Amino acid sequence: MKVLVVGSGGREHALCWKLKQSSKVTEVYAAPGSAGIAEDGIFNVDINENDHEGLIAFAKEQSIALTVVGPEAPLVSGIVDFFQAEGLTVFGPTKAAATLEGSKQFAKEIMKKYDIPTAAYEVFTDVEEAKAYVRKQGAPIVVKADGLAAGKGVIVAETEEQALVALDDIMGARTFGDAGASVVIEDCLRGEELSLMAFVHGETVLPMVPAQDHKRAFDGDAGPNTGGMGAYSPVPHIDANLVAEAEATILRPMAKAMVAEGVPFTGILYAGLMMTEDGPKVIEFNARFGDPETQVVLPRLETDLVDVIESTLSSKEIELEWTDKACAGVVLASEGYPGSYPKGTPMSVPSDVVEGQKWFHAGTKKTADGWATNGGRVILLSSLGEDLHAALEKTYEVLNAHEWEGLFYRSDIGSRAVNLSNKK
């Protein structure tokens, strides 16, 4: 069969790489793809990820048997509905179901209605009313743009002043465009963050192994929120019973809730969780694979990814097989990210990687002289190891052996988890 992956980032590179390993797959296409993705024998297709008609025409012309949609923007704009209307097999939520990510207010209202644990919240469309609420509640407090903001529309304000500035930016200056027309302001949850993704079709739920992402730009969890500076799986310092509780009280109830609401969910249901003293609570839901979590979860998956997707779409809850090895990934980002940053900075992609290591390209481009940067998060090195310590050691051994002019990376991804799990 031929498979099409919609998107061009590191998550899509990981998806293409994993799908190509399937015994059922003859060719994998990426639209628009990237030069980095093409390095793995994937065929790039020069069609924008939001060009629904162009993608449908290509899928028909090439007899694509399965399309997997990577990014959130085409999902929220209804790409799955267009494919389904043409009788094409596509893995992802409909426009209505993708609202779970497209509107934080929508997600919070469903959680409230179906008693899915999350932080207390209020929604505002007036900046002065929002500010008055912040002054009343005090800090720490969390301010979220309601709509899509490329993973950057969440401000965890440690002081009232930070929250007020965030409201001016989001609602006044419209830093995130129309995504800031309304905001969700919620209590600040404390605890350990956890990313828990599942393959979902209606009430069929196939959970993946958990991962932990590092959102802050700099070491010590300092600096602004980013799309993610690194991730690892498993998360050894979080009790397996808590993960099972999150599956039972959050993932499965949300799948059932979407069916009950008349907007059944198909695709990847991603729960961003906080493991609090009162148990797991939802920070946010996403409607697709996480980035960079995908780059550390898929290398651990031993079941054929096409089999997993086909079983999900057939409502079969098969047992997924995972390696016991750990996987750690660290992002190299352009200096200035997540703010403004230059593009076109020359860079190298070192070849001194060993078996079980993989470069996943996110924001690179090919030039006459080699590689250059073409985004904020540029590239991620993913490594499998016997345990988390070994996986991290392998990743940093390569990163630390090279000069990265114009790029930066966090040197402490996973280190706290290693320390905590050693103490257990």
Image (tube, rainbow, N blue to C red):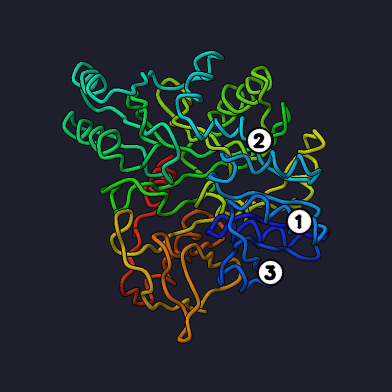
Look at 31% across and 30% down and name the residue there: 142
Amino acid type at image mark 3: Phe
Instruction: Work out whether mark 2 precedes mark 1 in sequence or the reverse, and give the earlier one.
Output: 1
Instruction: Work out whether mark 3 precedes mark 1 in sequence or the reverse, and give the earlier one.
Output: 3
**CA separation in Å, label 2 and label 3:** 26 Å
Circle 3/circle 1 CB separation < 8 Å: no
Which image quadrant for residue 32? bottom right
Q: Would residue 10 be found to the left or right of residue 5 on screen?
A: left
Image quadrant for the N terminus? bottom right
Amino acid type at image mark 1: Ala
Q: Which residue is mark 3?
A: 43
Q: Which residue is mark 2?
A: 94
Instruction: Work out whether mark 2 precedes mark 3 in sequence or the reverse, and give the earlier one.
Output: 3
Q: Nearer the viewer, residue 373 or 205?
A: 373
Q: Nearer the viewer, residue 344 or 397?
A: 344
Circle 2/circle 3 CB separation < 8 Å: no
Image quadrant for the C terminus? top left
| Relative vertical location of residue 216 with respect to residue 64 in this rendering, above or below | above
Residue 3 picture location, percent across and down? 75, 57
> Which label is found at residue 208?
none
User: In what element is the residue under mark 3?
Assistant: strand
Residue 298 picture location, percent across and down? 62, 53
Q: Would residue 263 be found to the left or right of residue 393 on screen?
A: right
Amino acid type at image mark 2: Thr
Look at 65% across and 35% down and name the residue there: 94
Residue 327 picture location, percent across and down? 54, 55
Q: Nearer the viewer, residue 415 or 162?
A: 162
> Which label is found at residue 59?
1
Look at 46% across and 59% down and name the residue there: 392
